Image (spheres, rainbow, N blue to C red):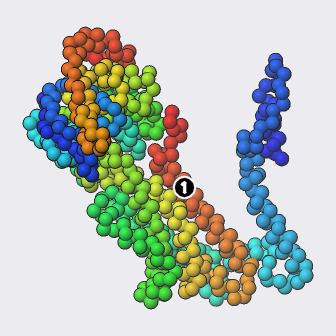
Amino acid sequence: MTATDTGSSDIAGAAPNGPRRRTRHRTRIVNRKPSRSAAIFLGLLPFLVVVVVYAVASADRLAVNPQDRLLPSIGQMWETFRTYAFTPDQRTGNYLLWTDTFSSLKRLFLGIVISGALALSLGISIGFLPMVRAGLAPFVAAISLIPPLAVLPILFLLLGLGDTAKVALIVIGIAPIMVRSVSRSVSEIPEEQIIKAETLGASTWQMITRLALPQAMPPLFNALRLGLGPAWIFLISAEGIQATDGLGYRIFLVRRYLAMDVILPYVAWITLIAYLIDLSLRLTARRMFRWAYPKGAGL
Amino acid sequence: MSRVTVDGLFMEYDRTPILERISLEVASGTFCAIVGASGCGKSTFLRLLLSQERPTRGVIRIDGDEIAPEPTPDRGIVFQRYSVFPHLTVCGNLTLAAELKRSRLVGRLFGAARRREKDAISDTLRKIGLWDARNRYPAQLSGGMQQRLAIAQALVMKPKVLLLDEPFGALDPGIRADMHDILLTLWRETRMTVFMVTHDIKEAFKLGNRVLVFDKVRHDPQHPAAYGATITYDLLLDRNRRKAPDAADRSGPDLAGSVH
């Protein structure tokens, strides 16, 4: 509604008191763009719809059975969330939400950082040095096809039940794809640039530090952002299978008591964290590598 | 001095000859324009001069010494595209060569050393009209600005031979004329040997004082790919003396300072 209004007023406003009579022109839908406020409204709309649908469904079920645990009310979930966040656990004295979050993020970040380091070092070597590419590219391609969850039991057996196995699962799950994506970007650096660097007297090592490394950074950040999704999957799975704390552990633990009032806020919390990590990666990349995101390109 | 000698050059890909029987003696300071139909091997010839590829037979010498088997700083290159580094500013592109030379380990200078190199290129920046754009990235430059930067970057190393592979092929006609003036000015200043591949015959005769025409002379109707191209015309133009006096009025106002 807002969108169409703005659209037609724009057209009318283009010639408020023009000398010539204008025939009324109906723009095609593809040419109608929402104003900023309309865009925000349209963006929020699906979220609102989901919340309203949930609230109605929950109220319906609770009206029939006030003890229903499957669709707790939003107020109920908020209460539980506050308890987890701000009341110490009776048994351990910990604030469960924060200890869970801290444990999970520690594993996630370790996994992401190790994968990123692998992606950068291996990706540049494979993408830039033909000898390394011949030796390692098929191997990395093969490793990336292993279903990571299939090796989780091996990791538990080899690395024990602690954090190491969980971090290893994340690394095995996302590093090979990240390596491949970075190495592909590096190998796509135009040959002209490599030759130009050679005519400027660059050694192989200097070409890596001044040409391949800086140009591999934006693809690395893209790979990190794309790797985060799978990283969460492997983290939650590993925690659900074997852990003593963590966001995934909590969800799988309270599932036994049908505690949807814990599970749903935890899922929302994980989603929020994932969004914030993604956002910070995106903004960091834009700020640090301005050359890759030019304003006024092709001036 | 940078005399280029080409001796008995043959080049074939998968047993298909591209270039054959090319022997050439180019005096130091020559502006050699290379023209020819598409696919006649003129770009291949340039790649051989650059050592981007190795000839099947024959040798190329600069001042009597065989060229290195890989690209080296004695031969500068400007391609039609992708010649400048997208992740470096105009300034960074021009200081890169000095940084690579003075910091062997990481190829990067910091602090005072970096400022010194920046100061050293400020004249060049003004001469090629990129002073105001010195902190922009190549993606924020027009095609003509990018090519001016590419030429300046290639000249920073003071190469013996400058190779240009259709450097103005992607530019508008008006900008092309400006680029010609800049290039001629730089050539007269540095007196280096230039090889320029171009599609544009007018451009070749305007810029070059020697024009090489590549074409196939031998044809086998049963096997069109049997023979490669060679130099069919080798025209020496006495342009040096004819053009030099009016060089000053030919160059644009922004270049007037750099002509002397």
Q: In which quarter of the image is residue B126?
A: top left
**What residue appears at the point 83 percent right and 70 percent down from the top-left corner?**
A55
Q: Which chain carries label 1?
A: A
Instruction: Tell me: A3 left or right of B255.
Output: right
> Which is nearer the eye, A103 or A290?
A290
| Mark 1 residue type | Arg
**What residue appears at the point 59 percent right and 83 percent down from the top-left corner?**
A240
Q: Is mark 1 on a helix, strand or loop?
A: helix
State the image coordinates of residue A204 (x, y, percent, origin top left).
Answer: 26, 53
The residue labelled by disc 1 is: A282
State the image coordinates of residue B58 (x, y, percent, origin top left).
Answer: 14, 42
Is residue B80 depicted above or below B255 in this figure?
below
- Please indicate, yes or no, whether residue B97 appears anywhere in the rendered image: no
> Which is nearer the eye, B83 or A66?
B83
**What residue appears at the point 63 percent right and 70 percent down from the top-left corner?**
A270
> Which is nearer the eye, B63 or A71?
B63
